Image: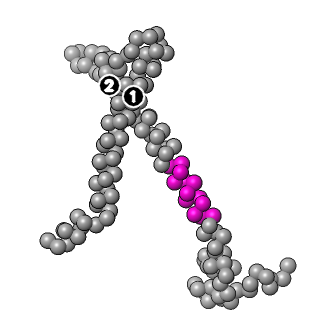
């Protein structure tokens, strides 16, 4: 029982629960954005009347296909994807590239085994070869 309690109290589970709650709330917000702002904007552009995509459908052999509801969900997906890309993916990509630049400046490659070692190292920790400092290397 104590193992289960430790599992539940681990930080990853709490973070995941918070992410799910925020994601569900964000989904509702985006759905409202599409329904209340984007759909009326499309209506204003296409002739002044507000389209209700959810009502668009067709029937084949008694089966009703609600393609308008699909359009609403497609718009929501596109808006969510754009927001996630511009507010999460792009900043994280920049941050990771900045961290890699800092790491590249702090490390160098061993000429013998090609492993990454600290820039100030005089001996490789992997292959133990002695390294010539950059200031002493012949040009």
Query: Residue 66 location, x and y as percent?
Result: 29, 22
- Residue at 49 percent across and 45 percent down: it is 87
N-terminal label among 1 and 2: 1
Magenta-span inclusion, residue 44: no
Residue 69 in sight here: yes
Foreground mark, 1 or 2, reads 1
Q: Give whichever of 125, 5 is nearer the camera.
A: 5
Q: Give whichever of 79, 41 is nearer the camera.
A: 41
Q: Give whichever of 78, 87 is nearer the camera.
A: 87
Is disc 2 placed on a helix, strand or loop? helix
Magenta range is 89-101
Residue 134 vertical position relative to residue 23 in the rendered view, above or below: below
Q: Residue 124 sits in which quadrant?
A: bottom right
Query: Residue 5 location, x and y as percent?
Result: 19, 68
Count neighbours of disc 1 (C-alpha within 10 A) and say few if under 14, some if 14 to 19, many if 20 or more.
many
Magenta-span inclusion, residue 90: yes
Which residue is tagged 1? 34
- Residue at 31 percent across and 56 percent down: it is 16
Count neighbours of disc 2 (C-alpha within 10 A) and say few if under 14, some if 14 to 19, many if 20 or more.
some
Residue 21 vertical position relative to residue 29 in the rendered view, above or below: below
Residue 114 in sight here: no
Residue 62 vertical position relative to residue 114 in the rendered view, above or below: above
Residue 97 as seen in the image, left or right of residue 47: right
Query: Residue 77 location, x and y as percent?
Result: 40, 35
Query: Quarter of the image containing the N terminus?
Result: bottom left
- Residue at 32 percent across and 25 percent down: it is 69
Residue 49 vertical position relative to residue 85 in the rendered view, above or below: above
Which residue is tagged 2? 69
**Image color mode:** one colour
Residue 62 as seen in the image, left or right of residue 12: left
């Amino acid at each position: 029982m104590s193992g289960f309690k430790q599992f539940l109290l681990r930080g990853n589970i709490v973070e995941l629960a918070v992410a799910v709650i925020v994601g569900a709330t964000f989904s509702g917000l985006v759905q409202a954005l599409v329904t209340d702002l984007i759909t009326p904007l499309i209506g204003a552009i296409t002739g002044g009347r507000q389209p209700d995509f959810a009502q668009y459908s067709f029937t084949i052999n008694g089966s009703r296909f609600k393609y308008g509801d699909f359009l609403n969900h497609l718009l929501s997906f596109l808006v969510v994807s754009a927001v996630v890309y511009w507010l999460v993916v792009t900043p994280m990509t920049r941050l990771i590239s900045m961290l890699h630049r800092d790491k590249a400046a702090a490390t160098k490659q061993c000429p013998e085994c090609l492993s990454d070692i600290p820039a100030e190292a005089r001996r490789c920790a992997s292959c133990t070869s002695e390294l010539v400092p950059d200031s002493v290397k012949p040009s």
